[in-house]
Image (cartoon, grey):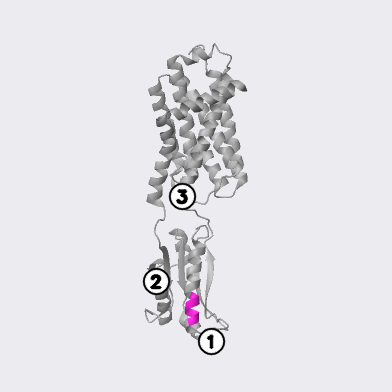
Amino acid sequence: MNRVLIDLKASFKMFFRSKAAVFWTLAFPCILILLFGAIFSEMGGKYSLYVQNLDIVDGEPTLASRNFIVALNLTDAFNLHILEDPTLNATKYALDKELSYMIVVPEGFEDDLNMSVLFGGATNATVEFIYDQSQTSATVVMGILNSVINEMNLGIASHPNPPQHFVVVQGKTIAPKRFSFMDFFLPGMIVMSAMTTSIFTAVEISSRYRESGIFRKLATTPLRRIEWILSRTIYLIVISFIGMGVILGLGIAFFDVKVIPDPVSLVLVATTSMLFSGIGMILSRFVKDPETAGAAANAITFPMMFLSGTFFPLEQMPEFLRAIATVLPLTYANNGVRDAMIMGEPQRAIMNTIIVAVLGVICLLVGAWITRWEED
C-alpha cells in the first residue's frame, strides 16, 4: 500500500504541474455547460403563460374574462399567449406542445361570477390552471396567479372582512413529469467528463510511458502492475470527482440547478471512471503511437457522447440509434446518474451502476492482463 501511495502522490504532482492538463480537464466541460446553458436555459425574467378563453358571447370575450386577462398582463410577470381556437383540448395541447403553464377561463365564467357576487361568495367562478409540476418555478407562478385572484376578489367584495372568494383557481398538474434542459444536461456532463478524463489520460500515460521507456524501468522496480493500475485508477477517480464538483458548482451558480449527488451517483461516477480507464488501457495496447492513440480515443468518445443520451434524450432519436445506444456503456452511466440525481429512482440507478461496475472490472482486468511492461 505504501508503494501505491507513493505512485499516487507522484501522479498528482505531475498533473498539477501541467497547467494545460488541469485547464482542459476542468475547462472543457465548463465551456460546454456555459454554451448549452446559455442557449437552452430559461434565462428570461418572465414566464410564458398560455391562455384559453372559452367565455365567449356573440363571438367576443365577456367583460369579466377580459378583465381577468388584463389583470394577468398587468403583473408584468408573464408573456401571455392567447389561444384563439376554443375547440382545443387544453390539457392535451399543453402535453403535446410541452408547455409549462396554461390558464383556461371556462365557458360561463362571467355568469358564475355574477351569481357568486349575488350570493355573497356562496358559489364560485373557477379558472383552471394547468401546469407542469416538475418546473421549479411552478410555486412562484401559482403564487402570482393567486395574488391576481385575491386582488380581483378584494375589488369585488363590499366587505373585505371576512375575505370573500368569488373567483378561485383550480390547479391541474400535467401527468408526465418533465425536466428542464439543464436538469437533463448536467448529469450527462458529469458522466461525460469522467469518461473523457479517464480514457484520454489512460491513453496518454500508457503511450508516453511506452515511448519513453518508463514501462521497462518500472519492470525492474518492486512496483507490480496491479499496484500501478490501482494507483492510476484511484487517481483518475479523484480527478473525476474534482470535475464533478466544478460542474455542479457551475450549474448551481449560473443556472439554479438544485441537484445534490447521493451515494449511488458518487459510486456510479467512480465506476464510470474505472470503466473508461480500463478501455483506455486496452486501446493504448493496440495503438502505440501517442498521437494516434489520442485520435483513436476521440473516435470512441465523440460518437458515444451523442449516441448515449449525454446531450439529448434518447427518446428523440430514431429507432436504429436507440438500438445502438443500448450497447454503449456510457448510456448506462448517463441513465444511472439521472435516475439517482434527478428522477429519484434508486432501484434503476443501482442496476445501471452494477452494469457499469461489472464492465469496469472486466475492462481493468483485460487491460492489466494485456499490459506487458517487459515487452514495452
The residue under label 1 is: 159
The residue under label 2 is: 73
Q: Mark 1 to mark 2: distance in Å?
A: 27 Å
Q: Is residue 302 left or right of residue 112?
A: left
Which residue type carries mark 1?
His
Mark 1 or mark 3: whose residue is earlier in sequence: 1
For label 3, the SS is helix
Image location (x, y in percent) of residue 318:
43, 44
Q: Is residue 359 visible?
A: yes
Circle number at residue 265? none
For label 2, the SS is helix
Q: Nearer the viewer, mark 3 or mark 2?
A: 3
Q: Nearer the viewer, mark 1 or mark 3?
A: 3
Which residue type carries mark 3?
Ala
Q: Nearer the viewer, mark 1 or mark 2?
A: 1
Please tell me how crowded label 1 is: few (under 14), some (14-19), or many (20+) other residues with Cα within 10 Å. Answer: few
Q: Which residues are magenta?
A: 149-154
Image location (x, y in percent) of residue 223:
57, 17
Which residue type carries mark 2?
Asn
Q: Is residue 149 left or right of residue 57?
A: right
Residue 150 within the magenta-colored segment of the rendering? yes
Q: In this orientation, which residue lies closer to the viewer: 274 or 361?
A: 274
Image location (x, y in percent) of residue 6:
56, 22
Q: Is residue 360 above or below residue 340?
A: above
The residue under label 3 is: 253
Q: Residue at x 51, y 87 (%)?
A: 158
